[in-house]
Image (cartoon, coloured by chain):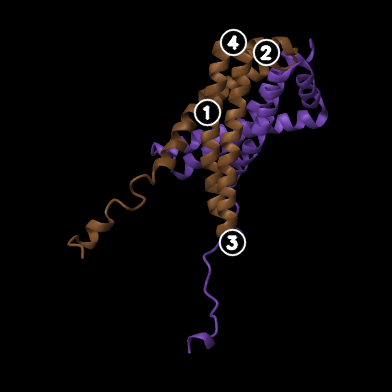
Chain colours: A purple, B brown
Amino acid sequence: MAEIRARRERPLSPHLQIYRLTLTMMMSVIHRATGAMLYVGTLLVVWWLIAAATGPNAYATVQWFMGSLIGMLILLGYTWALIHHMLGGLRHLIWDAGYGFGPVEREWLARATVVGSIGLTVVLWLVGYLMIGGSR
Amino acid sequence: MSMRTPLRQVRGLGSAKSGTQHFWHQRLTAMANIPLTIGFVVVVASLMGRNHAAVVQILGSPFVAVLMLLFILSATIHMRIGMQVIIEDYVHDDFAKFTLLIANSFFAIVVALTSAFAILKLSFGV
């Protein structure tokens, strides 16, 4: 009897598409996404370090790539991902300590994360450009 | 036949022994990553545009080299646990899941040791 019983459609728990998109939800998704980006980005760090350890020619190739438009865009994205993941991580550490769960605080923290990450990335690149861009 | 009660037989076998280890290590490395990443960014920014000889000298200097090694160690432990969580969340097919989990461990270790080797080579100048 068991095998002829029709499979009944079981109700599924609601998933992402059911909910209204909120800032805190977006920050959660972006935190994971930037983490995954940084994971892949370690390959750049490895390439850079190995090239430096190999010699001037290998290092020149890295420098050429990082100086190209695509390289600069990747570095810009890497900078932002690094800062965003760090600020998001700080937010998680605040939550781990038991603070910042209120509706006002968590909304404020989400805003601070995104504004802070974009702001700090711009500041870092501006400082870098002013210090290096002109002279070298 | 065992004289032990069922409770006695299962006690200590569950995830309660080390189930929070990843949770804790993720927080531990997260805290370490904050100063180490700031240091890493400062080092990278200060090396931008410099020639190879200068980069070798700065990266190989003891303070910078140790900072870089600590950063690599903490970051690779952190990213390995993080990617494991992502894989366990989204990949439910056993074969794919375990393949990816193994690949994840290999990737993290290769990144860690390759970077460490490069830094040590720069430091010791062989």
Residues at marks 2 and 3 on the same chain: no
- Work out whether residue A89 can be spotted: yes
Q: Residues within 10 Å of mark 3 (few under 14, many from 20)?
A: few
Q: Residues within 10 Å of mark 2 (few under 14, many from 20)?
A: many
Q: Amino acid at mark 4?
A: Ser
What is the number of the mark on residue B61? Answer: 4
- Asked if the residue under mark 4 is in contact with the one under mark 2, i.e. CB atoms within 8 Å, the reply is no
1 or 4: tag closer to the N-terminus = 4
Of A135 and B28, the residue lying toward us: B28
Q: Which residue is mark 3?
A: A18
Residue under the point 47% across and 37% down: B26
Residues at marks 1 and 3 on the same chain: no
Furthest residue in direction front, as rendered: B1
Q: Which residue is mark 1?
A: B73
The residues tagged by marks 2 and 4 sit, at their Cα atoms, a distance apart of 8 Å
On the image, which quarter does residue A74 sit in? Answer: top right
Question: Please, which chain is the residue tagged with disc 3 on?
Answer: A
The residues tagged by marks 2 and 3 sit, at their Cα atoms, a distance apart of 54 Å
The residues tagged by marks 1 and 2 sit, at their Cα atoms, a distance apart of 20 Å
